[in-house]
Image (cartoon, rainbow, N blue to C red):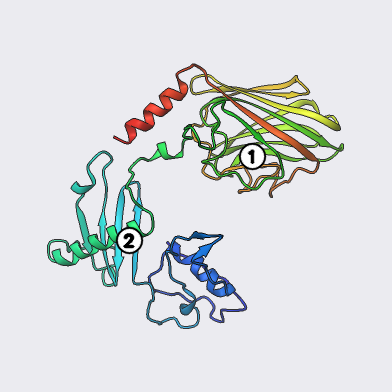
Amino acid sequence: MPLIVHWPKGITAKGEIRHQFHYVTDVAPTVYEVAGVEVPEVYRGVTQMPLAGASMRYSFAQADAEGRKTSQYFEMVGHRAMYHEGWKAVTRHVHGVPFDDDRWELYHVELDPSECHDLALEEPDRLADLIARWWRDAELYGALPLDDRNIELFGARFRDYSPHPTSRHYTYLPPLSLVPPQAAAGIGGRSWDLDARVRRDGGTGGVIMAMGNENAGLSLFVHDDHLVFDYNIFGEHHVLTSSRTVPAGECSIGVKFRRGGNDADVTLTLNGDEVGTQHLPLVMRIISTSGMGIGRDFASPVSMYYDDEYPFEGRIERVDIQLISVNQSDDGETAAREGMARQ
């Protein structure tokens, strides 16, 4: 995958290509070196994980410089690979198959960058060495234990002592930074209520709650003095606008989201009065991996009504979200699906 580096004050070359091997883990070390930041081994008394990467800055001034990235491990949903000094071992994992039964391939990527010629049978000792290196680095950088779950990893895990309260009631008191998806209210594929207490002047607007990004997500915001709910189903926008304006001053803003089967109905409320209802043809089970923003849209804009974070111009006192189970077995079924996925 290509990477474009733009640094007018530090790079004199223009339009040139570098061929040294590097990986996404090398972006942070590069930024640290350019900024003159030394990564601490201990921070606030806590030993930090080792930095998994190598700076690319050395290549900026010299196109043919010898590559300083000698090794890199890879892992995603059980698929694994190990690069070392121009060679790469790769295995494609089949969900449910024991990891020890995965077949490894070997490629001399320095001469065969498209990985067309599998040399596993010709170089068994080299392959064994790369596999051993993978296990060593996977342990060093926290990739173990292996987990071949896929979509199940993105759902909320409602466990005791987790960020998810047993009441399934979430209260947010701004100002807040981006809430990670693992800690945000798990509204994907569920019925839920939102109640926001806000104060604003007439003519002001902005995002109250947004989750996701321009590819998929939802956003609740005030625009042109009206309450707007945009449910972005992979680029297909379903927009509900309140039938009356949001009153100036203190106001209670609400959303009632009720899932049917694969569809849902959403209702907007102002000070307890219903001001608009819309049917949604599809309920997204996973909203996004971008997290939740309260008071602004932190990711790429969910809605086409704005093109930036669209911060709320008034004051948000609090936002409460209550998850509602369609039946008592909802949480149990979710846990069961996750448990089966681990078998």
Q: Amino acid at mark 1?
A: Ala
Say if residue 246 shows up in the picture.
no
Instruction: Compare residues 136 and 218 and report the one nearer the observer.
Output: 136
Dividing the picture into quadrants, the one containing residue 222 is top right
In terms of depth relative to the viewer, which is nearer, 133 or 76?
A: 133
Q: Farthest residue in the top direction?
A: 327
Which amino acid type is marked by label 2?
Asp
Q: In the image, what residue occupies the spot 30% across and 54% down?
A: 80
Judged left or right of residue 20, residue 282 is right
- Pointer 1 with pointer 2, Cβ within 8 A: no
Secondary element at tag 2 = helix
Residue designated by label 2 = 137
Residue 274 is situated, as x and y percent measured from the top left of the image, at 73, 19
Q: Can you give x and y, in whole percent of width and height, for residue 235 in the image?
A: 56, 39
The image shows residue 12 at horizontal and vertical percentages of 56, 82
Quarter the C terminus occupies? top left
Residue 228: numbered disc: none
Q: Nearer the viewer, mark 1 or mark 2?
A: 2
Q: Earlier in the sequence, mark 1 or mark 2?
A: 2
Report the disc number at residue 210.
1
Instruction: Indicate left or right for 242 with 148 as reference.
Output: right
Tell me if 68 is positioned left or right of 47 in this view: left
Occupied quadrant, residue 108: bottom left
Which residue is depicted at the point 33% across and 57% down? 138
